[in-house]
Image: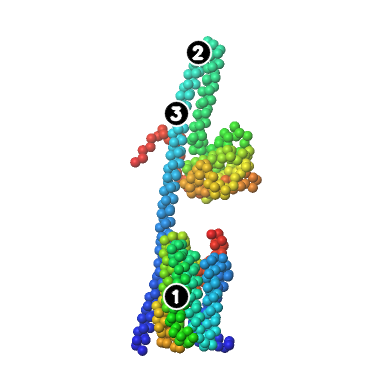
Amino acid sequence: MIESYISYLIRQPIVCIAVFITIVPIALIFIRKAYINPIFLILLIYLLIKFSLDLIMFHYAANRSNNIIFESLIVLIRYTFLSSIFCFQLENKHFKRIITLTIITFIIFSIWDFFSINESISSSHDHKEFLYSTTVECLLMICWIMVYFYETIRSLKIPNLLSYPFFWLCSGMLIYYSSIVFLTPFFHYTFKWNGGMDLGFFIYVPSISESISMIFISIGIWFFSAKNYAKQ
Amino acid sequence: MQNNDELKLALLIATMAMVIMAFFVIMFVMYYQKKKFEEEKKISEIEKNHSRRLLDTALNSEETERRRIAQDLHDDIGTMLSLTKLSLNQLNKIIGETGEKEDQILRKTQSLVEETILHVRRITRDLVPTTLERFGLAEAIDEFILKLEEGNNLIISFKFNAEEQELPRQGAKIELTLYRIMQELVNNAIKHANCTKIEINLNVNEKFIGLRVTDNGIGFDPEQIKISNLAGLGLLGIESRLAIVNGTVQYSKATSGGSSAFAQIPVVVVTDSKPEPLHPFRRERVNI
């Protein structure tokens, strides 16, 4: 068992880094006591779920078993948690309402997407690796990040953005989603468990951008001060 | 195969463009925010300077008006009263030969006039602290204490701690500001604190002049006053005067009971300009 893990680690180091780098922001949330803030609490729950699913996927991948169902599940969880963070952070009530509506719609859409795209549910080897919902998720998240940036510029409430945790979180998410937004629809048509087009380095782009975004998120958490938050 | 390579190139360009755009957006937000903050800072600085100038003008007008009233009292009413006293003296000589009753009324009138002259002098001095202009802050405070102790059962002590033996002279504006603040704080202590002892301390060093007024009265909670907006015109006046000279004030509960107020003003290098004339209205200034 361990041999297969080590073998997978050696074969796919970039993918494995993207899995295990999630420990850094989780640890930082505990060290900086960032969980007292509801935004970071949601982020912590998401990261814990994501890390658990990533570990399961790592296990299956190491044993060359099909794990595509988790890939589809993680999209649903990711959008639900990350967009709900914006519900707390955005000040505009209309946007908050819209985000809540999109979460509900997105859940329904992803379920529909999963069942309608994959012709045979029982045959997981023929499942598509990237669903339409991934592209929709990217577009929606980029939209909420832009709305947040617009609100930040308009309100002028943050004196120093470089030391503001949520700005780093948004920057990390923006880099992640903008780097995969063009790739996901393409992957949708090319990737299946049973092979597809050879895209070389491109198959690692989501993992690389995920690792970079995790570094940005970790920097944001590092800037969180429980003392200052209590004063607010 | 060629199509595959073209596709990869297109994907690479699209992905790179999106990542660069994301970085550009992040940089733009940071730059724009910084620029906006600098603009806001400049505007608030201009507003602050403007309100400071307005306050300065208002306080200067107040001082000028005080001088004008003092001048009028001194030159007109004072002179008239002195003349009345002289006339009464002359009348006294004439009446002294005729009757006792008239003499009594005259003496009473004379004493009333003398008392009025003393009152006018006191009011004039209160309006314009001439001792402050002539001899400086320490002497002016000493004189102020002396006058207060005359009519009250109060013990007022004054100490100054300067690096030199004598308290060095400061700019006219700073001296006047400190004097008026000291007056306000001592008057407040007498009016509201129900105290028997007041201590005035003046500390001067290279950077700051600190004035502390401590009393042993009933005291007050400075935080409560800030929250409930109970600060009266006196305390607001102190803050306004200090704002002009970049000073600060802190109120606290004294350890021995009562309350303590500490005003601090940065030392400004005194220019060689002559002190203001005692009666400036005698010299007409022409501003071009």
Q: Residue at x 58, y 88 (%)?
A: A1
Q: In the figure, B283 relative to A110: above or below?
A: above
Which corner quadrant of the image does residue B272 belong to? top left
Residues under labels 2 and 3: Cα distance? 29 Å
Q: Earlier in the sequence, mark 2 or mark 3?
A: 3
Describe the colour scheme in one phrase: rainbow
Give a yes or no on whether discs 2 and 3 share a subunit: yes
For badge 1, the amino acid type reads: Phe
Comparing labels 1 and 3, the label whose residue is closer to the camera = 1
> Nearest the camera: A21 or B124?
A21
* Residue B143 position within the rendered picture, expressed as x and y whole percent measured from the top left: 56, 35
Residues under labels 2 and 1: Cα distance? 118 Å
Q: Residue at x 54, y 61 (%)?
A: A228
Any mark on residue A191, and which? Answer: none
> Nearest the camera: B107 or A210?
A210
**Residue annotated with mark 3:** B75
* Residue B197 position within the rendered picture, expressed as x and y whole percent measured from the top left: 63, 39
Chain assignment, label 1:
A
Q: Is residue A47 left or right of residue A175?
A: right
For badge 3, the amino acid type reads: Asp
* Residue A225 position within the rendered picture, expressed as x and y whole percent measured from the top left: 55, 64
Any mark on residue B94, and which? Answer: 2
Q: Contact (CB < 8 A) between labels 2 and 3?
A: no
Q: Count neighbours of disc 3 (C-alpha within 10 A) and say few if under 14, some if 14 to 19, many if 20 or more.
A: few
Chain assignment, label 2:
B
Which corner quadrant of the image does residue A206 belong to? bottom left
Q: Residue at x 54, y 22 (%)?
A: B111
Q: Contact (CB < 8 A) between labels 2 and 1?
A: no
| Secondary structure under the numbered disc 3 in the rendered image | helix
**Residue annotated with mark 1:** A109
